[in-house]
Image: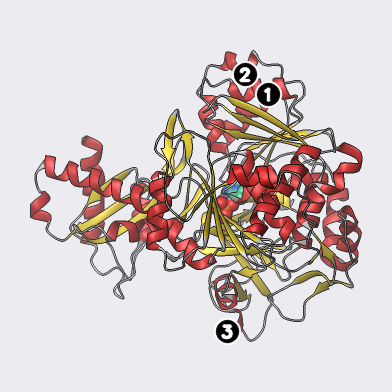
Amino acid sequence: MNRYREFHRRSIEAPDEFWRDEAARIHWHTPFDTVLDRSNPPFARWFVGGRTNLCHNAIDRHLAQRAQQDALIYVSTEIGIERRYTYAEMHAEVNRMAAVMRSLGVARGERVLIYLPMIPEAAFAMLACARLGAIHSVVFGGFAAPNLAARIDDAKPALIVTADAGARGGKVIDYAPLIDEALSRAAHKTPHVLLIDRQLTPEKLNAPYLIDYEPLREQFFDAHVPCEWLESNEPSYVLYTSGTTGRPKGVQRDVGGYAVALATSMEYIFEGRPGDTMFTASDIGWVVGHSYIIYAPLIAGLTTVMYEGMPIRPDGGIWWRLVEQHRINLMFTAPTALRVLKKQDPALMKQADLSSLRTLFLAGEPLDEPTATWAAQSLGKPVVDNYWQTETGWPILAIQRGVEALPPKPGSPGVPVYGYDVTLRDEITGEPCAPGEKGVLTLAYPLPPGCMSTVWGDDARFVSTYWAKSGTNGGTNSASNGESGELVYSTFDWGVQDDNGYVTILGRTDDVINIAGHRLGTREIEEALSGHHAVAEVAVVGVTDALKGQVALAFTVLRDADRYASGDARAALEADLAATVDRQLGAIARPARVHVVAMLPKTRSGKLLRRAIAALAEGRDPGDLPTIEDPAALQQIRDALRVAQMR
Ligand code: PRX
């Protein structure tokens, strides 16, 4: 424990010294003059004055030594394609994409919205933006048109990059109607839409604003676009994530701090060495994809595997065969995927030669003990859980095997990562909790390099959402409210820490849920449902699910309940409500069930008692509810759940 303790202590007590040393892992075009500027809390600026570029660090820097090494291996079991790109080829493709973007008017500081499936062009587009100093905003391909429109209006992109279609489970998903609808809904008029034509759809979207990528790529085939040397604190990207309100937040990331943090994580947490192959089974639309499919493995000189498809198609052995075939050393996915694989024929794993695999990493949702034990035993390799958020960009809690291989503790993602000053605090008083006491997981100011710089376009929202003075409240009051105490960032997660520093995560303190590793706001789902003409009121809660971790349940009060009294009318309505969520948000957000009740449990001041509803849905006691307006509402929830169970 001592090596880890000393390493962590130094990162907190002497951050300037610690991070000055670590910054040497990346290339600086101009050296920084200040390691950390803390003159304007809660904002922190890392490596002030230093100039660098993410694309240079991910690609160009490696050309001298590993031009012929694969940078990216693309596998799609959806369309039966495998393609490899060496660092030299990747460099050429990124330059072509950057030249095309530049010809369409994309310049430093401008936003490019990327709405693409898992195809190599998504990586090229992200890196091309980085090269130009443009700010990418990748929107998950599973999100529906209204969602996309909201992000277009917030990011105001100069360009959207999209494709003709995605593919999932053997079905082609035509993007054209989605893009068309999103563009007509958005108030911001995006000048150009660049189309990667995968030739998956017979019907082409023939809109005048569409520009075909392929002829332009040909035109700029030999282009070389120099890297823009950005000041370390200029934005690199904006990634939208769900919070307590229905309005998604644009998490803004810097350049230098992010590059340094990711490079250190490859050394101390992931132990990825140049020439290794890493397979992160996530999506570029999520933070795990940004950090561990694209930037971190490339910055560290690895080969990254990008996979389009499901873990069980053509069968549940596909990922293990990929490990064998590509000699994969590091694998990273979400516990949900593993729970799915655990249900498959065990022989499928045994048939593959997994000798190249060193470690399996898991993040995004709680890792249950049976799944962790199953994985560790059947693979015979370490399984490393790690806990973090879109906001932080890289792990907050993990066993840092590159520092010291501490023993894992079942149910816990491990101990605080260097750079993070973690304290569990009482939700109301903000006082630190004793070991074993449940509290809100908070981080002391300043956050380490790589964490969010602000909410895109809304500094005030960044301050008021995340920061508080510890003396006043565990993390919901504005930083400016506190008179004294420490300035702390709230993760909005409950946790408990043991005497040895291991933290166990006990769920969110807010209305964010996690379905199959996908972060969603229950408010967003509620807003989608309340748009339906039949709905008067609605509450959405997350409940535990054996496979997906959590699923959403909706409880609705109808405007005209009599109309839907018959079983058939009710069933048709429930299906229609589910379809409404699909249209507004995308199928990932669809509630597992929509229940109809006569009233919802609320406080006397009208606040929905979501925690009480969730408790009932999970068969737990909702506890004392002194502020409840009408206790009969709880019985309504119980009855609805019982009726549903009988059906
Ligand atoms: O509640 C925590 C949960 O997922 C949230 C962050 O989700 P997202 O922004 O999508 O970022 C995922 C990055 C891996 C957290 O606030 N969470 C994430 N990892 C874990 C976790 N809960 C328990 N254990 C984890 N390892």
Other-residue count near label 2 (Cα within 10 Å), few / some / many at <14 / 14–19 / ≥20: many
User: Can residue 622 be seen here?
Assistant: no
> Would you place residue 210 above or below residue 66 in this image?
below
The quadrant in which the C terminus is found is top left
Q: Is residue 274 above or below residue 128?
A: above
Q: Secondary structure at mark 3?
A: helix
Eyeballing the image, is 479 above or below 127?
below
Residue annotated with mark 2 = 349
Q: Nearer the viewer, residue 339 or 297?
A: 297
* Residue with the most extreme bottom position: 483
User: Would you say residue 557 is visible in this rendering?
Assistant: yes
Which numbered marker is on residue 379? Answer: 1
Q: Amino acid at mark 3?
A: Asn
Question: Which residue matches tag 3?
Answer: 481
User: Residues at badges 2 and 1 in contact (C-beta under 8 Å)?
Assistant: yes
For this rendering, which residue is in front, 22 or 138? 138
Left/right placement of residue 563 relative to residue 35 reads left
Of discs 2 and 1, which sits in the foreground? 2
